[in-house]
Amino acid sequence: MIVSVEQFGVKPEPGHDNTFALRKALDYCKGLDVATLVFPEGCYHFWPDQAVEKTLFISNHDQEGIRRIAFLLSEINEFTIDGQGSEFIFHGPMIPFFIDHCRNTRIQNVIIDWDEPMFGQGVVTSVGDDSFDVKIHGETTFKVEDNNLWFAFGGKQERVWGINEFDPRTKAPAYQSGDKLSWGSYNHIRVKSTESGSVMFYGEKIQKPKVGNVVIMRFGRRENPAFFLKDGENIHLNSVDVYHAPGMGLIAQKCTNISLDHFNVQLKPGGERFVTATADATHFVYCRGKISMNHCLFENQLDDPCNVHGIYARIAEKKNKHQLLVELVHGMAKGIEIASPGDILGFVSRESLLTYANVKAAEVEMINKDYLLFTFEQPLPEMVQINDVIENLSWSSDLIVTNSVVRANRARGFLITTAGNVLLEHNQISAPGSGIKISGDANYWFESGAVKQIVIRNNEFLDCNYCCPDWGRAVIDIDPEIEHPEKYEGCFHRNIRIEGNQFSTFDTGIVYGRSIDGLVFTQNVIKKSNTYPPHQYMKHPIQLEASKNVTISDNRWMDDTAALAEVNGDIISLDMQRSVISSD
């Protein structure tokens, strides 16, 4: 059944808040077996004042607080929203779409934006010995008070806590700028107004941006993604453009089968903003089935284009021979339901990150946002240690990314820690950090998922790692955080195949890897560019440690020097006529 929002009072008029009327339309559709909710093409506005609110725990977002939601889709199956090219404008802190426990859901032909962004933007007008002046773009309201810079967002004053520098020529992070004006470094910066109406940032030995470059002044918390998908199945997003979000473009938790086709986190055509989402473009946590992305564009977000992973929970206490109390450690993993009865849990050494036992969960009780109590069908393995970690082996997704573009964002490209089958093919990737990062750790982020089968094929990598080493040391960076991987017989990651790609790079590092069993690097073309000065963080194009079953063959190194690889300490020449094979 086709339902138009017009009959519920939803109107594409400036200043008209459609939030409450939209809720009536969604309630009506929930009573139908199959429905398509249609928006006549136009520009629709939504404010948080009359929005439904829920306490949500959203992975990799700041946790504390209640979220207000415009499109709340809860237990609505066989449902489509068709915006017919409409633009949805949001005002202040709110989540546009929360899709909760839904099956066969489709969102298509919509544009998402905010009236005012959750960042400030300005141009560097002058640079002194220990200061620089910025002329702030007129889109946002700001004030200088108590040596700090404040911006208005959602009816509150938010203090700036970091700055990122962008090159206006490329609209990408400036060469080697990294996070040198954010996080702890920003704590040494003070702010005052100037007579010309600009603001001056000053402090001893601060990193100074270049005159004419654009600076993004960051404030607020990452709380409100454009799309939050939870416990759903068969969710399709087609022809969706996210121009801005005060959080991620999309985050999915415990979902099965997600497809994104022409899902773009992109700058508004003709707009003046340099930033899209204030965190990742897409992020998937403990999903399973297939995640597919085709013909997507992810640009200018303030974190990674895509991250796929699970969550390690730390073993806190053995209650008895069948029960464990485990802790969700990282602040952005709190409250996440990481397992259900019947799931298989892997027990992992915190030092080696190697799995030493698998046990099925009989009961899972969420004690609070910090702790879960697991009851297992079998007795606990004797080798279980406090501070080791567990991960859910029953929830691991395949990932297919094709014909997509990544560019001009802060940080890395694709972050992949999933045990499913992974294919990245016919993509164009340019990032200030590593174009692809395959990691895993049980000491800070606690993001789990040793890879088992990855194919990186026929992609084009353009000048990655131009902010080295802030976000990686090579174009492809495989670095599980294991302090001494050479001590262990087993490897964390397995079966990584890199073939038929084109690497255009100004620098040395192509592949860095550690603790890998089975890596093939073949039929790739590597050519030098002169886009940026080389920083030569890596001595050789390929550097592998504590790895085995390595094959490097039939690659073309299009420069005047002979390429070298360092494999487990051995230096090996790489010309296209020779193969390098390292085995047990």
Image (cartoon, rainbow, N blue to C red):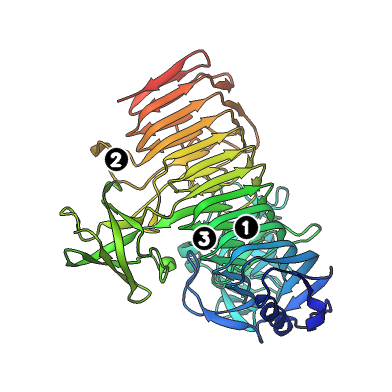
**Location of mark 3 (residue):** 255
Q: Position of residue 174 (x, y in %)?
A: 62, 50
The answer to which of marks 1 and 3 sits earlier in the sequence is: 3
**Residue at the location (15% across, 54% down)?**
382
- The circle drawn on residue 485 is 2
Q: Nearer the viewer, residue 405 or 253?
A: 253
SS type, badge 1? loop
Circles 1 and 3 in contact, beta carbons < 8 Å: no
**Residue projecting furthest to the bottom:** 50
Q: Where is residue 314 in the image (x, y as percent from the top left)?
A: 29, 62
Q: In which quarter of the image is residue 209?
A: bottom right
Q: On screen, 67 above or below 489? A: below
- The circle drawn on residue 403 is none
SS type, badge 2? helix
**Location of mark 1 (residue):** 301
Q: In this view, does 383 lie to the left or right of 390?
A: left
For the C terminus, the quadrant is: top left
Q: Nearer the viewer, residue 137 or 26?
A: 26
Q: Where is residue 106 in the image (x, y as percent from the top left)?
A: 67, 62
How many badges with numbers are in the image? 3
Q: Nearer the viewer, residue 555 or 51?
A: 51
SS type, badge 3? loop
Q: Is residue 470 left or right of residue 442?
A: right
Neighbour tally class for label 1: few under 14, some 14-19, many 20 plus, Cα within 10 Å: many
